[in-house]
Amino acid sequence: MRRAVAVLLPSAVAVTLLAIGGGAASAASSGAPTAADWRTPPAENVVVIDTSKGRIVLELIPEVAPGHVARFRELTREGVYDGRTFFRVIDRFMAQTGDPDDTGEGGTKKPNLKAEFTFRRDATTPFVAAAAPAGTEVGLLKSLPVVSQAWSWAEVTSDKKVAAWGTYCPGVLGMARDENVDSANSQFFLMRQPYPSLDKRYTAFGRVLSGLDVVRAIKTGEPVAAPQDKMIKVRLLADIPAAERPTVRAIDPAGAWFKGEIARVRAARGADFSVCDLELPVQIK
């Protein structure tokens, strides 16, 4: 049985200011972002999910889990995700979908995926540290909140890299599995709220850029009684005809504006700061 967890608690320009973890920090920073502060994710890494509750836009992060990103693209292009229901949705936790049988027990005939709970980062990995608690570093890799070993450990590792992993803040995309760590296939889940106990237990490989409100509006249930909320159409941005393709851009964590925002939020939150308190401005039109 492929489930996200066994037993756990439960025409105008649109600008979305997404709190990675639903923190209380405001999106305002000193001054407005300049053109240099924005980045445009590759169209191959952006997924547009039109659901019965509205549109969700995801960014896939191949640096952290290339096998899972490749499978997600493949299933998207094959239409496997079109029409799939959200069959298991837990308030203050996550929304699960992607089962061709819509039962929580199915999958495709493709081979199961090897777990990619962690990845190795080096000096070229576009990770931006926001804080360094207890010998680790927390920050963003593009839009994904990430926890990493402190970079100083690279001096003593054979590959001159350190271990890192996506952390489960709201909007993070994870792959479901059963008790076998290498059993992920097609089912995935989107976080409604933070749940860091999933870290290094389920592969995190993307994040909601726009539509977290949609994820949180999906009917709840474990399982959902007579599920009606579904993904009507799932497409890669690269495959959407140019005439109807939205433009998507997000603030670059490495830019000057966001570095100032990190400092502001850390000062406001003090000892309670979490990477989930950061907000990432996203612009879609």
Image (cartoon, grey):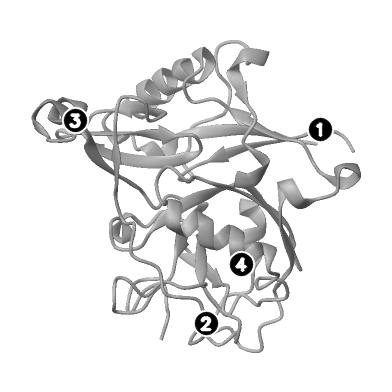
The Cα–Cα distance between marks 4 and 1, rounded to whole angstroms, is 30 Å
In the depicted view, which residue is nearer to us: 272 or 260?
Answer: 260
Residue 39 in the image: x percent, y percent? 61, 26
The answer, for residue 173, to whether it is visible in the render is no
Do the residues bearing badges 4 and 1 touch, measured as CB atoms within 8 Å? Answer: no
Q: Which mark is residue 37?
A: none
N-terminal of the two: label 2 or label 1? 1
Q: Which mark is residue 75?
A: 4
For the point 29% across and 63% down, the residue is 201
Instruction: Please name the residue that numbered disc 3 is placed on.
Output: 160
Residue kind at label 2, given as amino acid type: Lys
Image quadrant occupied by the C terminus: top right
Do the residues bearing badges 2 and 3 touch, measured as CB atoms within 8 Å? Answer: no
Instruction: Please name the residue that numbered disc 2 is placed on.
Output: 109
Q: Nearer the viewer, mark 4 or mark 1?
A: 4
For the point 32% across and 78% down, the residue is 7
Q: Residues within 10 Å of mark 2 (few under 14, many from 20)?
A: few
In the depicted view, which residue is nearer to us: 28 or 45?
Answer: 45
Q: Is residue 261 above or below residue 114?
A: above
| Label 4: which secondary element | helix
Q: Is residue 153 above or below residue 213?
A: above
Q: Which mark is residue 13?
A: 1
Q: Residue furthest left?
A: 156
Q: Nearer the viewer, mark 3 or mark 1?
A: 3
Residue kind at label 3, given as amino acid type: Lys
Residue kind at label 1, given as amino acid type: Val
N-terminal of the two: label 4 or label 1? 1
Residue 229 in the image: x percent, y percent? 70, 74
The answer, for residue 283, to whether it is visible in the render is yes
N-terminal of the two: label 2 or label 4? 4
In the depicted view, which residue is nearer to us: 136 or 121?
Answer: 121
The Cα–Cα distance between marks 3 and 4, rounded to whole angstroms, is 35 Å
